[in-house]
Image (cartoon, helix red, strand yellow):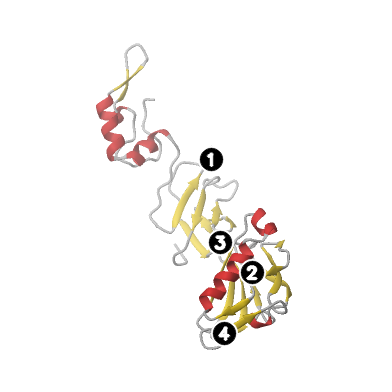
Amino acid sequence: LTASADGFNGPFSTLAELGVTTQANGTLSINDSTLNAALADNFDSVAGVFAQVGSIADSNISFEGATANTVVGSYAVSITQLATQGNLSGTAISDPGSSAVVLDGTNNSFALTVNGVASASISLTEGTYNSAEALAAEIQSRINGDAALSEAGINVSVAFNASFELQITSTSFGSESGVAINSNATTALGLAGAVATAGVDVAGTIGGVAATGNGQLLSAASGSDAEGVRLTISGGALGA
């Protein structure tokens, strides 16, 4: 109530600077105009006086929180590995724009596992597909509409790359992210020789101590001064 907020370097660090002062009888008095002006001009800084906050210089890192175990201070962050998404890459097919892909009841079904959850048999709409984009959109729609995957909150993105290799990518990051074919009758899509690549978790240090990665979330080590700090690492270069 009377001291500055520990470790906070914003334009405000005390209640008095926000128009909240202690009276002789021990009650608090609020200067509405001072507080309202501070809220209008520096809302985040006002919040920092009342609550735990983290300020980060790198736009690729987001502060998610800390705990009562976190020692107030500044902590260097170094990233040694960015989180990736699991994906499945098929073999190249002919450009559907030049050689249309025809799907019928003999070649339009497959089943897969995404993030450890198995789908039911997925059937694509029968017909002639004259563009890679339309075919990818159909595949994505059918996979994301699978009941088991949908119930688990799992989604994928689907596209053909420049070599017309089908790419099915989990929207989740980390070691639990992956896509694998369970059964395949869609020979026209190049899935027979598809290669699966599992995702990896972010890795690095917080305050010079190895942190724990879970997807894109990096958590400071238990027992370190930074214990409780949680950061989302969304990209950027490796290193400090």
Which of 48 and 207 lies nearest the eye of the viewer?
48
First-in-chain label (2 vs 1): 1
Residue 69, compared with residue 165, is above or below; it is above
**Residues packed near mark 2 inside 10 Å, few (<14), some (14 to 19) or many (20 plus):** many
Confirm whether residue 169 shows in the render: no
Q: Residue furthest top?
A: 25
Give the total of numbered labels: 4
Q: Quadrant of the N terminus?
A: top left
User: Which amino acid lies under the numbered mark 2 shown in the image of this protein?
Assistant: Ala
Question: In the drawing, what numbered circle is on residue 45?
Answer: none
Badge 4 or badge 2: first in the primary sequence:
4
- Cα–Cα span, label 3 and label 2: 13 Å
- Residue closest to the eye, 128 or 231: 128
In the rendered view of the protein, which quadrant contains the C terminus? bottom left
**Three-letter amino acid code of the residue under disc 4:** Ala
Which mark, residue 67?
Answer: 1
- Of marks 4 and 2, the one in the foreground: 4
Mark 3 to mark 4 CA distance (whole Å): 41 Å
The answer to whether the residue labelled 4 contacts the one labelled 2, judged by CB atoms less than 8 Å apart, is no
Q: Nearer the viewer, residue 127 or 226?
A: 127
Q: Which residue is mark 2?
A: 198
Nearest to the eye among marks 3 and 4: give it. Answer: 4
SS at mark 3 in the image = loop
Q: Which residue is identified by label 3? A: 202
Q: Amino acid at mark 3?
A: Val
Which quadrant holds residue 94?
bottom right
Residue plotted at (55% across, 70% down): 137
Report helix, strand or loop for mark 1.
loop
Identified by mark 1, the residue type is Thr
Mark 2 → mark 1, Cα distance in angstroms? 32 Å
